[in-house]
Amino acid sequence: MHKLGLIGGLSWTSTARYYEIINQAVHRARGGQHSAPLLIESLDFATVAACTSDEEWDSAADVLIAAARRLETAGAGALLICANSMHRVYDRVQGAVHVPILHIAERVGKKMQADGVEKAALIGTRNVMTEKFYRQRLVAHGVSLLPPDMELADRIDRIVYDELTVGKISRESERYMKSEMTDIAKQDVQAVVLACTELELIVDVKANVLPIYDCTSIHAMAGVEFILG
């Protein structure tokens, strides 16, 4: 098996989910006592969580580049950045290392294209829902996206940063997301892209009117493909 590096801690709750998905899949594939050969660089999320200005994103890029280089030096043959929002600096991080970094939106876009999905709603934190760094990757795979709902984006930001990233799961937030998913299903879309690694904690991806593309699971499984060769 090949060794995979995870840039995690973004937040720790979703990194734990990556670890679980990857190890469960490797065990299913190999059986016995097999588990995944992983290197994990768990960052202090507080240092990069609230990026808004270009200067703050420059600083976040430096943090991720340093992490990627440490993982590469330690022997990782490929890397995952375990957060959708941090893919805003993906190109800079990939340019700083020689090993491939598997892009979360590329993997999701490829799966949607293979499934014949042409119209979808993108759900995530504000920068993922509104900025082109993520949306363009999906559009490049033939997926037309609904315009971002700014009220939803702001509410998700509060849910993610005030609750989920600190391990808090609220019934109110669960009900809110279920209601929003029901409303989205009434629009002219074929699927929902759940582009926040924490939202899976309060959204039942298997019990929804529309198919949900859970980016965390899809990304983690791309890592499993690399591990198993």
Image (spheres, rainbow, N blue to C red):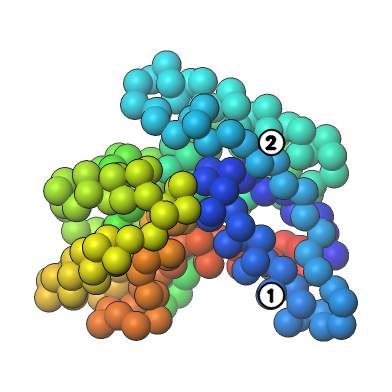
If the image is split into quadrants, where does the N terminus sit? bottom right
In the rendered structure, the answer to whether residue 102 lies left or right of residue 166 reads: right
Give the structural element (helix, strand or loop) at label 2: helix
Relative vertical location of residue 207 with respect to residue 153 in this rendering, above or below: below
Q: Nearer the viewer, residue 96 or 44?
A: 44
Q: Amino acid at mark 2?
A: Ala
Point out residue 201 in the picture as x, y percentages from the top left corner. 43, 64
Tell which circle, 1 or 2, labels the residue nearer the N-terminal end: 1
44 vs 145, nearest the viewer? 44
Residue 28 position (above or below residue 195): below
SS assignment at label 1: helix
Q: Would you name the residue on which mark 2 appears?
A: 68
Above or below residue 60? Residue 162 is below
Q: Quadrant of the C terminus?
A: bottom right
User: Residue 123 is drawn in which quadrant?
Assistant: bottom left
Q: Is residue 142 left or right of residue 121?
A: right
* Measured Cα–Cα span from mark 1 to mark 2: 24 Å
Name the amino acid type tagged 1. Ala
Residue at (82, 59) in percent of width and height: 37
Residue name at image x 42 percent, y 16 percent: 55
Q: Is residue 201 left or right of residue 44?
A: left
Is residue 181 visible in the rendered image? The answer is no
Q: Residues within 10 Å of mark 2 (few under 14, many from 20)?
A: many
Residue 76 in percent (x, y) is at 79, 47
At a point 83% along the width and 35% down the height, the residue shown is 73
Q: Which residue is mark 1?
A: 25
> Does residue 227 lie above or below 48 as drawn?
below
* Observer-nearest of 92 and 199: 199
